[in-house]
Image (spheres, helix red, strand yellow):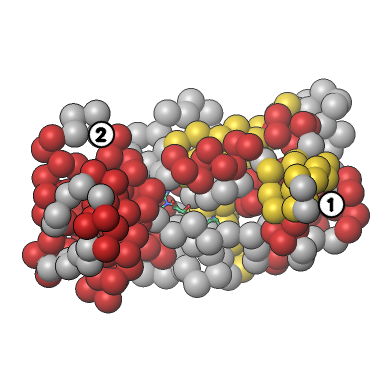
Amino acid sequence: MIHSLLQEFNLTDKEFELISKLVYSECGIKLSKEKNELVKSRLTKRLKKYGFRTFEEYYEYVTAIDKTGNELVCLIDCISTNKTEFFREKAHFDFLDKEFLPDLIEEKIRGGFYKLRGWSAGCSTGEEPFSIAITVCKHLDIFSRWDVKILATDISTRVIEKAKQGIYEKEKLETLPQGIVKTHFICTKEVDTAYYSVKEYLRKMVLFGRLNLMDKQFPFTGQFDFIFCRNVMIYFDKATQRELVYKFHKYLAPGGYLFIGHSESLTGIPNSFEYIQPTVYRKNNVLDS
Ligand SMILES: C[S@@+](CC[C@H](N)C(=O)[O-])C[C@H]1O[C@@H](n2cnc3c(N)ncnc32)[C@H](O)[C@@H]1O
C-alpha cells in the first residue's frame, strides 16, 4: 500500500497511443501528444486504486478484463474536461431572452402549441441547462399550461450526478445578479460553508441523463426548438464534428437554433444551417429536415 502511494508512474508513448485511441473511438475526444502529462496525472489514481503497476496493465483491464464496461466509464470521466459556469458566454442568453424566445413563444401561442423543448448537449455539472431554464422562466409562467423540458446530457457520469443534485457552492454563484439568486435558489448552510440549491420548479424543468454524442442514433422521438452544444466539439476532429452537426440538424425542429461555443465554428463543416451570428445557427425550413 505504502509502495503504491509513493510510486511514480511512467506513461510511455505506446501506452499513451493506446489510451488516446481508445478515448477517441469511445467519445470522439482527440488527445494530442501534449496531453501526455494530463492523461498521466488524471489516470494515476485509477492505477493506484487497483494496484496496477503500468498503464498497459490498466489498459488491458479496461479493454479486455472488465466486461461490465464500468471502468471505461470511469476512464472517460477522468479524461473529460468539465469547465463551465452559470450564464457562460452571456450573449447566447441575451439572444434567447431578447430575440429567440419572444418570437418562438408568440408563434407557439398562435398555433395553440404550448410545448417547448431544449437540449444542453455536453451539460457538464448543470450550470448551462439551469441558466437556460432561468431564462425561459422570464418568459413563461411555468405553472401554467406550458409543457417545458430542457434535456441535459453528458458522457461523464460524475458530472451528471453532480448536476442532478442541483447544489452549488457560493463561489459558483458569485457572477450571478442577486435577483436571480434570490428568485431561483435556496441557501443552506453547512457549518461555515453556504450552498445554494436550485428551486424545485427549475429542477423539474431539466431532465439529466448520460448520453454519448458519438452514438449513431439518439434515443429521441421528437425534435428540439433549440440545442446548446458549447465547448464540446472543440475536443473533436472535423469528421466527428461533421457527423454531430448533421445529427443536430436532424433533431432540430424547422426554425430551431443551434448554439455552439465561442471558439467553435461551422466553417469548413458541410452543413445546412443558416448562419445568424457568430456561434448561432438556424435550421431553415421543412425541406431541410
Ligand atoms: C468544457 S465542458 C462544456 C460545458 C458547457 N457546455 C459549457 O459550455 O459551459 C465539455 C463537456 O462535454 C462533455 N463531453 C465530451 N465528450 C462528450 C461526448 N462524446 N458525449 C457527450 N458529452 C461529451 C464533457 O464530459 C464535458 O462535461
In this view of the protein, can residue 263 be seen by the observer? Answer: yes
Badge 2 marks a residue whose secondary structure is loop
Q: Residue furthest top?
A: 145
The furthest residue to the front: 2
The location of residue 178, given as percent across then percent down, is: 88, 58
Horizontal side of residue 58 vs 221, given as left or right? left
The kind of residue tagged 2 is Gly
Q: Earlier in the sequence, mark 1 or mark 2?
A: 2
Horizontal arrangement in the rendering, residue 279 relative to residue 143 (left or right): left
- Examine the rendered structure and indicate whether residue 29 appears above or below residue 71: below
**Nearer the observer, 25 or 76:** 76
Residue 288, placed above or below residue 111: below
Note whether ligand 1 is within 8 Å of mark 2.
no
Quadrant location of residue 53? bottom left
Q: Position of residue 127 (x, y in %)?
A: 64, 51
What is the total number of numbered labels drawn onto the structure image? 2
Element on which disc 1 rests = helix
Which residue is rendered at x = 11% and y = 45% of the image? Answer: 60
Query: Depth check: 91 or 42 in front?
Result: 42
Left or right of residue 268: residue 279: right
- Amino acid marked by disc 1: Val
Where does label 2 land, which residue?
69
Q: From mark 1 to mark 2, how far is it between C-alphas?
A: 40 Å
